[in-house]
Image (cartoon, rainbow, N blue to C red):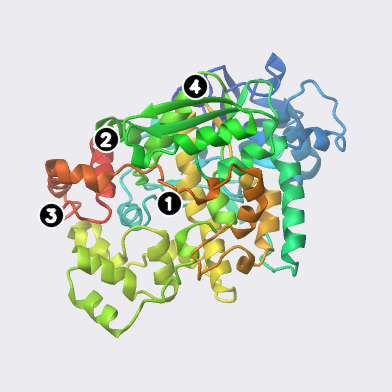
Amino acid sequence: MCGIVGIIGSRATRATVELMARSLRHRGPDGEGIWDAPGVALGHRRLAIQDLSPGGYQPMLLGSLALTYNGELYNHEQLRQHLPGPWHSTGDTETLLHLLAARGTAGLDSAAGMFAFGLWDGASRRLVLARDRVGMKPLYYRLLPDGIAFASELKALLILGKPPIDRSAVRDFLCHGYVPAPKTIFEGIAKLPAGHTLVWQDGRATIERYWRPTTTIVERSEEQTLEQLDSLLGDVVPTHMLSDVPVGVFLSGGMDSALTTYYLDGPRTYSLGFDARDRSELDAARDAARHFATVHSEMTAQTADFASALDSLPAMFDEPFGDSAAWSNYLIAKFARQEVTVALSGEGGDEIFCGYPRYWSNVGGRSNLLNRTLAAVLPPLSRLGASMQRRAAVGLPAYAVALGGLAGSQVDALLADDYRESGYDYLWFYRQFWREELDPLAQLRWLDLNTDLAEGLLTKVDRTSMAHSLEVRPPLLDHRLVEFMLTVDPALLVNRQRRRGKLLVRKLMEPRLPPGHLNRPKSGFGLPVHRWLKRNPSVLHQAVERLRARGIVKDPVTTEFRRAWYLLVLDRWFTAFE
């Protein structure tokens, strides 16, 4: 795992790219590489994981090509068997470079892994940027008057100057809890969406989606599906252990991390608990570790270390990010990094196996005339008004409320005039992935995979782990597994009457886990924000007053406000970046 940067155009100086690369030192503390030619400069910060020798240094050159790359290809040894070489290293960077030289971006169809890269072809003066299928690795870019710049994180591009705030991105953040791609919080800086390439040549940038998985359901019996899933997991999960440095596994008390651990041979496991037992899963994780005979380590953190979280998160994400569980990810990454450089996690299981409550809660089914009437007349930011907003929605708005943060009417009621826009489409991000032709459960699964997964969950995992120079790999999001699960009938995964999801995984894992393990309540890793604010209401009031003074919000809110953490984060972000 690494940090990548680059500039094409008149601003492409070695000194500038060095500054950009050094801002990403946390992503790659093991070395820095800079390559430049007239009108182009590429930089790389290395976290050495495969081929620890100088043979793995980047940027890497092959003929007229220069590559700076962040990621891991788990099948790179198999890919090498079909590429001509010659080979000067044992790492996947050289494999990717030869693959792109031989097949261009069409070669990405055969690459299994997570990646973001910049490939410069000096012969054609052409830059190719690409991001992996589900968005595990980040990639930002900035179009310049005579070129383009790119980087793994926003902070590196701010070295070229800080643009104005994109006020529509503030609206989107309050709606989603993150700024959705391709937007960022800054005008003129964009995210490359997951599963896309960007080609820059002759002053023009062309963006295309290269991953288009099928959503056609394949008829299989439950027994056939279980057999194929078990076989696929057994093939895929162990490949994610590919490394020349120590690897561990994050093990919580939940199903997905246990599933990941089962297919490995006695790995090192790491668990996080809290000092409040009602929020800790350490007992369940400890039982699973003992059952799987892992080399287990655990830590206990303070449940309410809010001050540290608010001080750390804005700089970590570079833009407002509203998932308070980021703090838990940050703590467990810091703990595991004391012993390992790579960690596997169970992230993505809720998306591909339909594990969220929204999958069995009949989204939009509670809308009736009374709810809609109350939603129209009650103050949108009141506790009852917010509840009615959620109950009144149907169709895509109901899915959006189930997936995201605040309804558009609530955002409009909260923001000052300068940050509102009449008729703003708060559903624009979800709308592009809304598939009317799909079964309702398949619709929701498709939305999850294409929206909140990359921009919310995987952004959280990447920034909190790379803050400690730890590479986290989610094998349940390997594209081979995702593509298979998209062909599985969601009816095999969800029982609405029993209010349960992940039925296939339950049947697969129940005999493989300690008795009763799957029936334990899951506590989650978000901070108990409302409990804390009830004891410390002045924290929210002061944050809102600062936002009011900046002209961002107009009305005070109470500690019962549904997404109070969003306002705390927004306040701290503006304080840090202004």
From mark 4 to mark 2, how far is it between C-alphas? 35 Å
The residue indicated by pointer 4 is 18
Q: Residues within 10 Å of mark 1 (few under 14, many from 20)?
A: some
Residue drawn at x 66%, y 66% as measured from the top left: 215
Which of discs 4 and 1 lies nearer the camera? The answer is 1
Note whether residue 170 is visible: yes
Q: Note whether 280 is above or below 381 in the view shown.
A: above
From mark 4 to mark 1, how far is it between C-alphas? 26 Å
Q: Quadrant of the C terminus?
A: top left
In x, y percent, where is residue 405?
34, 57
Residue drawn at x 43%, y 37% as measured from the top left: 154
Q: Note whether 391 is above or below 267 in the view shown.
A: below
The residue indicated by pointer 2 is 306
Element on which disc 2 rests: helix
In x, y percent, where is residue 118?
61, 37
The residue indicated by pointer 3 is 556
Which of discs 2 and 3 lies nearer the camera? The answer is 2
Q: Which dot marks residue 183?
A: 1
In-front residue for pair 19/291: 291
Q: Assess whether mark 1 and mark 4 are in contact (beta carbons under 8 angstroms).
A: no
In-front residue for pair 560/7: 560
Q: Residues within 10 Å of mark 3 (few under 14, many from 20)?
A: some
**Mark 2 or mark 1, which has the lower sequence index?**
1
**Mark 4 or mark 2, which has the lower sequence index?**
4
Horizontal relation, residue 333 to residue 387: left or right? right
What's under tag 1, amino acid-wise? Lys
